[in-house]
Image: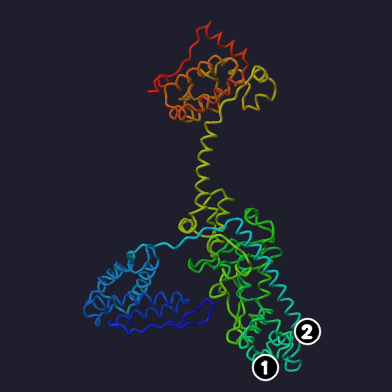
Amino acid sequence: MTGLDPQDRPVTVVFYPAAHTCAGLAGELADEWVELAESAGFREGSCRTYQRAISSFCAHVDANVVAAQDASLAREVPDLHYAVTEWIRLLPAGYPAASRRPYELAGRLRMLIARRIAHPDRPVAGHLDGWVQGAVGLRRGRGEEVDEFTRADKKKLIQAAWTDRLATEARIRTGWVLAAAGCDPALGGWMEPRNLLWALANDAWTCEDIARHLPALPQWPPALRELVPGDVLPHLARRYLLRRLVATLFPTDMDLHSYRILLMAATGRASEEVVALNEDDLEYGPESVLIDFTKRRARTVQRRSYGTEPDEDQRGLHPAAPRLDAVELTRQMLQLARPLAERSGVTPVPLFLRASVDHYALTIGRFVGKGSGAALADWLRAKEVTIQGSADIRRLRKSGKVEKAIAFKGRISDIADDHTTETFRTHYAHGTTLRVISGHVITTAQQHWLDKALNGPVVLSDEAEQALVEPGAADALGLSPEDVEQLRSGELDMGVSSCRDPFASPFGRPGQLCPVAPTRCLECRNAFVLPSNLPQLLMFAAHLEQLQHRLSPAHFHALWGQNRANVLEALSLRTSDEITHARQRIADEGLTLNLPLGAQVEFE
């Protein structure tokens, strides 16, 4: 079976049915695998997953099924339905807890059997049809989730990528200028670096040709010797020189790390989405670019427009400098990749195309970003960037999600704008993202009730009460002239304070007379405390003081803490003479505080 590796090179995946006792069954599954791979164009990873599924199941049949040599999907004996269910039951034991691999292998086997059932000329006996139509029988498992980069680490990462990108472009510009100044090394000499660059730039000589014409290291002139490390072994000098020359003209794997970081930060997309871009996915406008992002696993294509300036809703997600401009960045990447694409005949031009030297041969392929000496951790080490946690590029995508959660105040519909909310829940709704969303939900709920009921009353002095009749004063408090007249005449007196509208209580249903007056008036936004309410206010303060002695501190604070705080604040706005006069009035007139029965026995 032939699949494609990350560089789109064919890779052969081998499976031998004859190696199993149940060779007939293995051959049937292998036939379905080959046909499916040819029709779907499998990558190497998918090919190997199917191969492992077939090998694992056939090994189980060999070890546990009587007369395994007779096993076939077309026969009822031996019963493969029981073999399948037993294989699935035992699969998780061979992998770490919560591993996704058992579900993947079972799903691949079910896919192959389902294809065979759907084929009219390939009978499948027994009860396997029921398993194919039902559940796999295993949980999906979960992968290892990563946390986002801290803001400081992300800033360092982008700054280092920006600096490296500028250095890469300056190096390649200088290389092409030197190549233009050179000539054919067969005429101008093989010891002149610019002639060697000319040969590579014009594809006149191969790397093997250059290595063959170069003498031993001791015979190199200083201009060539300074292009290789001083401590290089003589037999490796040609290889080091060729890598240096190729890197002078074309981007390498290490160079493309910086472009991936910048493009991910500019677009907020995942690594596999930006790395897979080619020129057909880009549509340029006067000051914008329209990009088609392909989610290979979800089999979806999403289109997004980016301007030379960040969108209004994205402006807070990017650092002020360097400017993350997707338009300029993609144009520059196409310019770097086009010479390599023309040389290798690749069309459309991939954005992430790199050159390398393998055994004196120039190799052109897609960016991989992993492997010995070319991983993100190696790039960070080379750029002397230290970060907290693992060097995992997925953390940059997670950082974008956290910033979106903050910018959009926890609205999942806006955070999960490039995938489903279910994907967001399983892959991103944890760690800082979850804390931001949870905090926003709690804050919103608290603010809702605070705005609804705990704004507290409006306390008016004598002068303020008299000023209500002046034009504009009542409007500032949301009162009509009729409301002012009713307040001053006492028609809206609720016992401890006056109320602008007793039928619009935040503690009751619309149209219902306030059910908690007067015990909660001091916590209500509709309340007005007038100078005439001072005697009732003093008696209510005394009532709260009695409750404070009767109830435990925690119980009193939970029930009456806000009320007491508001009462004391309202009394603090009165002068000592006003309070003395109000107390004298209480004694002379025998005033009492009318409270509902529940308020008298609540301490029980």
Q: Which residue is at the front of the view, 459 or 430?
A: 430
Q: Position of residue 501 (x, y in %)?
A: 54, 24
Q: Earlier in the sequence, mark 1 or mark 2?
A: 2
Q: Select label 1 or label 2 by which is in front.
A: 1
Q: Which residue is at the front of the view, 545 or 539?
A: 545
Q: Residues within 10 Å of mark 2 (few under 14, many from 20)?
A: few
- The correct choice, above or below, for 479 with respect to 211 in the image is above
Q: What is the CA distance from the residue labelled 1 to the residue labelled 2? A: 21 Å
Amino acid, disc 1: His
Amino acid, disc 2: Ala
Q: Position of residue 227 (x, y in %)?
A: 69, 81
- The correct choice, above or below, for 172 with respect to 491 in the image is below
Give the mark count.
2
**Residue appearing at x 72%, y 73% in the figure:** 170
Direction from residue 565 to residue 72 in the image, left or right: left
- Report the residue marked by disc 2: 181
Quarter holding the N terminus? bottom left
- The correct choice, above or below, for 581 with respect to 502 in the image is above
Direction from residue 246 to residue 498 in the image, left or right: left
- Look at the image and name its color scheme: rainbow
| Residue 481 location, quadrant | top right
| Residue 60 location, quadrant | bottom left
- Report the residue marked by disc 1: 213
Direction from residue 468 to residue 515 in the image, left or right: left
Q: Position of residue 295 (x, y in %)?
A: 52, 67
